[in-house]
Image (tube, rainbow, N blue to C red):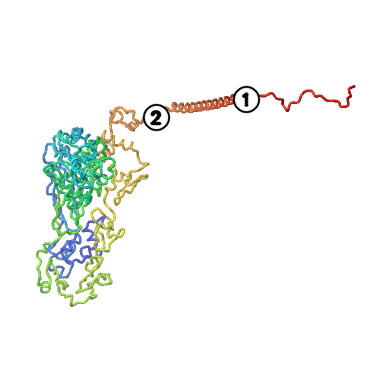
């Protein structure tokens, strides 16, 4: 019912079927309690109420009370409203005018009663040619000597680059090292104090905490002159006192020269880590940093050895207060640390600085463009009892719920945010003022809220009224507020004279026990028992603030308030147990699309709906259209002013000036698509990937290479065999020459003739 019907229709619906509604079911006894039940509830302060004097609930729907005979003059029914107090139009350009408006409206007045909500719209525009104050804050420790040398030649070029974005530029320069006390400083001899580089055989200036070398000026030549005069110093430990310097550069507005109507860009360059709050305890410094300006007549920080380093939280507060955008220009060694700082400090960015600061101009330019391409709303002084929820309407006209930022903007773009303010409970103050402002902007929306939590009839109360049983109570808003120990509609009962009973007036319809088993029935009214878990209240003690849904053991997930069995969620949370975040910035992809356009953001987490898409923002999708297809859409919208991105106005948000029109497709293999030179209205898209190699030539080359390798292999084998044979033959000849032959008979040889002697022969 709650999702589809207005509040008054809900109450009528319930009244029709059950005879009760949210107003009458709570059993409230005072006007103030009644107004806090629901925005649809009204209170009748008329003394006699009901047909023929019959008792009816004084807390009911407005129309029901009128039907019961309540005079409209006796009705207490404050309404919520929003009134625009100041609504100057947005400016187009900053040049040529002293009064620049980037936020509209400028002032609002709201009146809210408990539980009620009102919507209003904030519009923001990044105007063209807005003044820029650039303060360059440099680490002058010994390791930054080559960076200082390079900066001496970059002053004019830096100014020229920044003047491409603004015609009203002012530049300043400051330097820092570290606290001027041990253990951060060399202090073991007067020579070393005056010249910290004395032990290494060179000369440098004495150590200092922070020095405002040059206040903001439009004379760029002075910036270069002052930088050339600077020399490095030398401190003892590796971390530097950068946060001390940042704090003084932020809060010393008059000394630094920050203009109220300008973008404030504070650039911190260093190659080392920085000390933070509590680090000064090593030097015996226990006094916390108070965030005040302490520059003396010589523009030196004179509380360096007295105050602790500032905390990141204090830096963040002072940046918000003074509209500062902080750029950490740091070397690769410390980039991870400063990225962590940047996540904790809204309005800060991190850039990778080369070893000699040669890329500092490009770094500053990119950081400034990044700052100017994004609008983030921040809240200052919002009461805890007030819930604010945001819906962003960025460049494509699409309403993104739960988002209070827009990215991918260009100078001159206008975005709007729908803000819903809901009062959860009544604060002690009757009026509060808070501010909504874009991060780093001077302009803001100031909102004054009057809390309609009281009743006008309370001012007409009569103490010790005779209506209340001869002065036993105060007659207020048509009912008696009894003194302690008295009860009853007219305070006619004394609690001392009555014991708990089972009076039917204390038993709810359909109930079995008096006061829901959580109270005593005294004089026909329930007196609820105290409970260790929380409060119990209601006509029948049916309500409490501890029996609601839990999530991971936490009542209402610690993101809401339990009220009579239902969770009333804080701003940014929804669900029966307030466990579902309404934030959508966690679902925003790097190209500025919610879940990369491939899913839905549910409870702050992307649920990918496109097949094949995955990742925290559905950014990975092997089966989705490739980058060439996306670039094709950007070519159509940026160059031809047509196509899908033009119709839904996504061109500026998705296409990041990556398209370059050329007359001829170059030889570079990195060029994937190009625009044909046809000037006809039906200009086609030419897929001009570099031509592939000739297949025949490739085939012949491969075959030839194989044959050549085979021939070379055979030649090598033949050469090795020949060498081996020659070596063996030479060895044989050598052994042959060494041989010595002797004449001898072959023992195996048998002669051709044989001689036999006849033993019987006698010589005759």
- The image shows residue 236, relative to residue 28, as above or below, that is above
Figure quadrant of residue 655:
top left
Rate crowding at label 1 as few (under 14), some (14 to 19) or many (20 or more) other CA atoms within 10 Å. few
Residue 645 is situated, as x and y percent measured from the top left of the image, at 27, 39
Q: Find residue 755 and report its horizontal and vertical position in percent.
A: 81, 24
Q: CA distance from mark 2 to mark 1?
A: 71 Å
The reply to whether residue 125 is in sight is no
Q: Residues within 10 Å of mark 2 (few under 14, many from 20)?
A: few
Q: Which mark is residue 739?
A: 1
Label disc, if present, on residue 331 of the rendered structure: none
The residue to which callout 2 is attached is 692
Depicted 16 relative to depicted 146: above or below: below
| Residue displayed at 20% across by 60% down | 38
The answer to whether residue 54 is visible is yes
Q: Earlier in the sequence, mark 2 or mark 1?
A: 2
Q: Left or right of 103: which side holds 668?
A: right
């Amino acid at each position: 019912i709650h999702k589809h019907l207005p509040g008054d229709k809900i109450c009528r619906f319930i009244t029709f079927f059950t005879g009760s509604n949210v107003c009458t079911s709570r059993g409230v006894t005072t006007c103030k309690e009644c107004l806090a039940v629901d925005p649809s509830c009204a209170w009748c302060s008329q003394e006699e109420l009901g047909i023929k004097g019959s008792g009816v609930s004084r807390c009911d729907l407005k129309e029901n009370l009128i039907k019961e005979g309540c005079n409209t003059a006796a009705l207490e029914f404050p309404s919520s409203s929003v009134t625009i107090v100041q609504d100057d139009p947005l400016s187009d350009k900053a040049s040529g005018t002293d009064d620049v408006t980037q936020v509209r409206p400028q002032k609002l007045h709201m009146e809210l009663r408990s539980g009620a909500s009102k919507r209003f719209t904030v519009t923001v525009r990044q105007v063209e040619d807005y003044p820029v104050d650039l303060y360059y804050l440099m680490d002058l420790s010994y390791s930054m000597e080559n960076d200082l040398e390079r900066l001496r030649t970059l002053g004019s070029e830096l100014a020229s680059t920044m003047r491409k974005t603004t015609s009203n530029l002012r530049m300043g320069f400051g330097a820092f090292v570290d606290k001027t006390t041990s253990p951060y400083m060399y202090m073991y001899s007067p020579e070393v104090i005056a010249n910290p580089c004395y032990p290494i055989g060179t000369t440098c200036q004495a150590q200092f905490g922070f020095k405002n070398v040059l206040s903001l000026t439009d004379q760029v030549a002075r910036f270069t002159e002052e930088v050339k005069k600077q020399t490095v110093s030398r401190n003892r430990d590796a971390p530097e006192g950068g946060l001390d310097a940042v704090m003084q550069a932020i809060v010393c507005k008059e000394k630094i020269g920050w203009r109220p109507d300008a973008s404030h860009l504070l650039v911190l360059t260093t190659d080392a880590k920085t000390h933070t709050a509590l680090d000064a305890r090593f030097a015996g410094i226990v006094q916390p940093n108070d965030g005040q300006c302490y520059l003396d007549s010589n523009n030196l920080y004179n509380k360096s050895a007295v105050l602790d380093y500032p905390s990141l939280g204090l830096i963040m507060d002072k940046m918000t207060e003074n509209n500062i955008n902080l750029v950490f220009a740091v070397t690769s060694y410390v980039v991870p640390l400063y990225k962590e700082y940047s996540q904790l400090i809204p309005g800060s960015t991190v850039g990778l600085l080369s070893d000699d600061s040669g890329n500092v101009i490009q770094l500053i330019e990119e950081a400034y463009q990044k700052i100017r391409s994004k609008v983030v709303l921040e809240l200052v002084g919002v009461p805890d009892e007030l819930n604010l929820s945001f819906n962003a309407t960025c460049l494509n006209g699409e309403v993104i719920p739960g988002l209070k930022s827009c990215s991918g903007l260009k100078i001159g773009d206008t975005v709007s945010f729908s803000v819903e303010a809901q009062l959860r409970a009544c604060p002690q103050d009757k009026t509060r003022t808070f501010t909504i402002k874009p991060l780093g902007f001077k302009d803001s929306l100031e909102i004054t809220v009057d809390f309609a939590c009281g009743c006008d009839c309370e001012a007409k109360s009569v103490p010790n009224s005779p209506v209340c049983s001869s002065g036993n109570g105060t007659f207020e808003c048509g009912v008696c507020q009894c003194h302690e120990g008295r009860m009853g509609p007219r305070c006619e009962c004394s609690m001392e004279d009555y014991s708990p009973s089972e009076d039917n007036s204390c038993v709810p319809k359909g109930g079995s026990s008096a006061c829901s088993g959580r109270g005593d029935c005294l004089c026909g009214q329930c007196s609820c028992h105290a409970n260790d878990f929380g409060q119990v209240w209601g006509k029948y003690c049916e309500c409490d603030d501890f029996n609601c849904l839990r999530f991971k053991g936490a009542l209402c997930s610690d993101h809401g308030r339990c009220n009579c069995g239902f969770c009333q969620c804080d701003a940014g949370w929804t669900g029966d147990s307030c466990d579902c975040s309404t934030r959508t910035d966690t679902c925003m992809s790097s190209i500025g699309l919610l879940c990369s356009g491939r899913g839905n953001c549910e409870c702050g987490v992307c649920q990918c709906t496109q097949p094949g898409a995955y990742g925290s923002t559905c950014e990975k999708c092997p089966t989705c259209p490739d980058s060439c297809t996306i670039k094709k859409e950007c070519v159509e919208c940026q160059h031809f002013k047509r196509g899908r991105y033009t119709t839904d106005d996504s061109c500026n948000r998705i296409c990041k000036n990556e398209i370059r029109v050329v007359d001829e497709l170059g030889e570079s293999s990195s060029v994937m698509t190009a625009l044909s030179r046809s000037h006809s209205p039906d200009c086609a898209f030419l897929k001009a990937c570099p031509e592939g190699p000739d297949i025949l030539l490739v085939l012949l080359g491969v075959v030839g290479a194989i044959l050549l390798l085979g021939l070379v292999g055979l030649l090598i084998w033949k050469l090795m065999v020949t060498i081996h044979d020659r070596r063996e033959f030479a060895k044989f000849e050598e052994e042959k020459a060494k041989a010595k032959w002797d004449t001898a008979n072959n023992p195996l040889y048998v002669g051709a003739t044989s001689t036999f002697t006849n033993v019987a022969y006698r010589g005759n």
